Amino acid sequence: METLTAAELLAALGHESRLSIFRLLVEAGPAGVTASAIGEGLGMAPATLSFHLAHLSRVGLIQGRKEGRFIRYATDYAAMDDLLAFLTRNCCQGSGDCLPRTRAADSIAKRRGSLQKTASRPGTPLTSETETP
């Protein structure tokens, strides 16, 4: 990941409302949440929510998929993992001995392991839908 890309993602998360939306979607997992449920959960007006969802989608932190007349939003875990990897690259002078290891780092390792297993099965597409949190 380039520094400019990381800065753009971090800038998007630098707004309180967008950070709240992103955290809610991370918590929801790969199944995602409808826009109306996000608005209700965060007490956000539809126009404001739409603006922030569009911004997060544009920078690639979340994805929306149409389900009937609703749009369900979910975290793009690959983008999140790339950002975390960029931020922690060469942490502790590259020794990898940084303590304490966070549950988030363990979760990333498990998710990547799950993706590799899925990718090794013939005929199985590798999509964010196959990821496990």
Image (cartoon, helix red, strand yellow):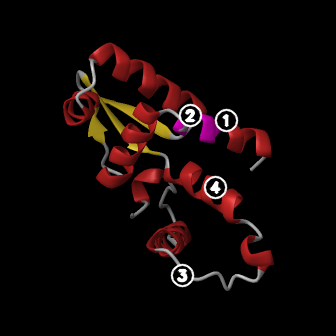
- Mark 2 lies on a secondary structure that is helix
Q: Which of 67 and 17 is in front in this view?
A: 17
Task: Classify residue 21 as left or right of residue 8.
Answer: left
- Mark 1 lies on a secondary structure that is helix
Name, please, the residue furthest toward the top: 47
Task: Classify residue 22 as left or right of residue 88.
Answer: left
Residue denoted by label 3: 100
Secondary structure, magenta segment, majority class: helix
Are the residues flagged by discs 2 and 1 in contact, CB closer than 8 Å? Answer: yes
Residue 112 image position (x, y, % from top left): 54, 69
Say which label, 4 or 3, has the lower sequence index. 4
- Mark 4 lies on a secondary structure that is helix
Q: Tell me which residue sits at (23%, 25%) in the image.
A: 68
Task: Classify residue 40 as left or right of residue 11.
Answer: left
Q: Which of 84 and 65 is in front in this view?
A: 84
Residue denoted by label 2: 12
Q: Mark 2 is on which residue type?
A: Ala
Q: Nearer the viewer, mark 2 or mark 3?
A: 3
Is residue 34 magenta-colored? no
Are the residues flagged by discs 1 and 3 in contact, CB closer than 8 Å? Answer: no
* Numbered mark located on residue 82 in the image: 4
Q: Mark 1 is on which residue type?
A: Glu
Q: Where is 94 relative to 80, above or below?
A: below
Q: How crowded is mark 4: few (under 14 residues within 10 Å), some or many (20 or more)?
A: some
The stretch in magenta equals 9-13
